[in-house]
Amino acid sequence: MADVQFRDVDKVYDNGVQAVFSLSLQIQDGEFLVLVGPSGCGKTTALRMVAGLEEITDGTISIGDRVVNDLTPKDRDIAMVFQNYALYPHLSVGDNIAFGLRLRKTPKKTVDERVQWAARLLGLTPYLDRRPKELSGGQRQRVAMGRAIVRQPQVFLMDEPLSNLDAKLRVQMRAEIGRIQRELKTTTIYVTHDQTEAMTMGDHVAVMRKGELQQMDTPQKLYSDPKNLFVASFIGSPSMNLVEAEIERRNGGLVAKLADQELAIPAEVASLRPALAGYAGRKVALGIRPEQLEDASIVRDGADGNRLRGRVLLTEALGSELLAHVELSGRPVVTDDVLEGAVELEDAMLDDLAQKAEEERTTFVGRFDAESEVRPDHIVDMLVDTGKLQFFDLETGTSIRAG
Amino acid sequence: MSTSERVAEVTVPAVAERRQPKRRRFAQNWWRHAVALIALVFALFPVAYVLSAAFNGDNSLSGSSLIPRHVTFDNFRTLFVGQKNTTGHATFQNAHYASWFANSMIVAGATALLTVLLGALAAYAFSRFRFRGRRLGMLTLLLIHMFPQLLAVLAIYLIVLNVGDIFHFIGLNTLSALVLVYLGGAMGVNTWLMKGFFDTIPSELDESARVDGATPAQVFWGVVLPLAAPVLAVIALISFVATLNEFVIASVVLETQHKFTLPVGLWQYIDQKYSEHWGPFAAGVLIAAVPAALLFAFLQRYIVQGLTQGAVKG
Ligand SMILES: Nc1ncnc2c1ncn2[C@@H]1O[C@H](COP(=O)(O)OP(=O)(O)OP(=O)(O)O)[C@@H](O)[C@H]1O
Ligand SMILES: [Mg+2]
């Protein structure tokens, strides 16, 4: 059991590529930290530096109270689950799991006990004599897990261990890994590019972009209070609706004007973000989560709420809810931050977005109640929960808060 | 795909399994059988001659028919106990076949073993470590290999001669010197072959083992070598057979009957000096083929595909 600390860690590869910039992170003892970010942002690099598979160019990494910069992987007392499992193909499942213990000259009896224990925990007991190639993907994944947990290391490192599994198995294994980690209380660093995985699994989530840490927080905080446009658009699915809006003073309060419509900003929101008043007369990026939008026609006492009106482009009925894509006038935010964060959008959609920005049209996604009867081409009034509006500086991309 | 993988593939006969009625299958495939038959005849023709000569009493090639008129083991006896009847030709006072055979086994065995070991060590380093001079080292190995070892015979002779003044155990007329020369000669191509094969073993396996607590040596012996078995077997075999056949360098380095290897020793039977004793020569060759065949039979089961299957996904 130990905590892990990154202090100003840099990584420059031999070819001159800098993959990690001055990364500082603290992972508490027993905590489950998820490192998340788009492809190529340096997650694997960061993890491999903890494992000792990659040299640390600058800064220090410590495990417990030991600085491990110069220790070999063997001496760091960590276990790693690789993205492609990396099972030893010439050894049986049992021998794969026992490999690390045998290297440490553990007495045979203890090895057997521990292998049995791990196999039971992971439901691998019937497969102990098989070779890896005789297993399914999910079983291989569990063998890889077994190899990690059997040694009871101080830290688990996992590099996208679920990315090769199908959607259903992924959800199942996600829960499984969470359960095992809680049971063993081993400090864990888990790398993924899937923000849903990050949000559901992590005690804390660290969002990275281009080698730099953007924000590290609990999943709830990341969601409700993203520090910048990148985090805002990266976290959440469907992602946050972002539109340019002009802040204006009106009757002692503030309103956000989107083209021909406007939203009154509640006093609580304004007081939580004192700096917002300073933006009066200027444009900001306004962020609205899909669940802050509701079809006004199915809300009984929403007569005097804030509303936005638009034309429905398409709807996705998910059974429990209805996702409505609603087009309204206003300029979507298309800075690099947003485009990079919106990893779920395909290239064609990104082009479309740019096109629409030119035409001052934006598409909001609303997460309506399943009762809603909006259909494509309807004009819909959306009730906006303005208490959770987010504001970002258009230049710097950072959230607008105090001074 | 790497060169070495191709080696492994070529060596493994593909099992063509197609469920078809027997007759139609033959109608479509007869030409394959024909090709195989021709290849077989072509390959077995010399073997037939050697067999015939070995068991023939007539002791010359030209006058004899393929089927020996009278089958005899005299030629074999000649090899081990000397010649029985001296018909005007020079005779061997002592039969040295047993020591030639032993020498050949020692030299070929040691060369094969050490070639595989040293080649694997070098290849592992070239495949897995990034160090200064890595590229240069690889290119140099390749370059050296471009020159046939035969070119260096004179140099080898002088080196061995002079080194022998200081270190007697690797001087002229020692088996160890011969082994050393062979090792140097085959290093380059074998290292390349093995490196190619090692490159196909996912490096995550090494890393995983290192995280599991293995030292580089343990990774090498415990993970990489077992997975490289096919290429190791192929190289061991090639190197064994090549060493067994090698004549020129052996004849330069070795000087006395007791130290000769089979090619050098047997050559004397057909050398002009002793006129042509094809019978004992053929018999000697026949016995020499046995260990190579046995080694092949033994190593064959390591020459299989798909050893790394299941290691990584995708
Ligand atoms: N061995 C290497 N040599 C040079 N550059 C590398 C090396 N490994 C990674 N990089 C570069 O470092 C950057 C970060 O790579 P890294 O593998 O850490 O990304 P990642 O966040 O794990 O991405 P993914 O989600 O695709 O796995 C990338 O720009 C990559 O090209
Ligand atoms: Mg990665």
Image (tube, grey):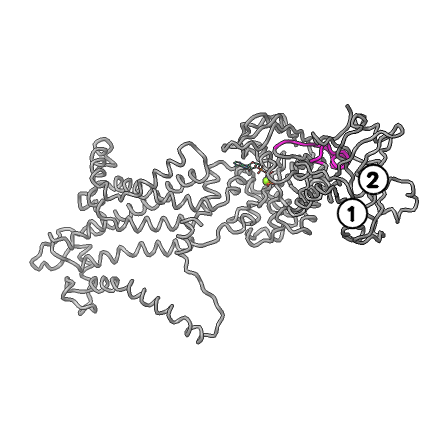
Q: Which residue is mark 1?
A: A326
Q: Is residue A182 visible?
A: no
Near mark 1 (Cα within 10 A), the count class, few <14, some 14-19 or many ≥20, is many
Residue A378 is situated, as x and y percent measured from the top left of the image, at 82, 52
Residue A97 is situated, as x and y percent measured from the top left of the image, at 58, 44
Residue B275 is situated, as x and y percent measured from the top left of the image, at 11, 56
SS class of the residue under badge 2?
strand
Near mark 2 (Cα within 10 A), the count class, few <14, some 14-19 or many ≥20, is some
Contact check, label 2 and label 1, Cβ < 8 Å: no
Query: Along the horizontal axis of the image, is A94 left or right of A361?
Result: left
Query: Along the horizontal axis of the image, is B103 left or right of A120?
Result: left
Foreground: B197 or A243? Answer: A243
Q: Where on the image, by quarter, is ligand 1?
A: top right
Residue B254 is situated, as x and y percent measured from the top left of the image, at 20, 43
Q: Which residue is mark 2?
A: A261
Q: Which mark is residue B278?
A: none
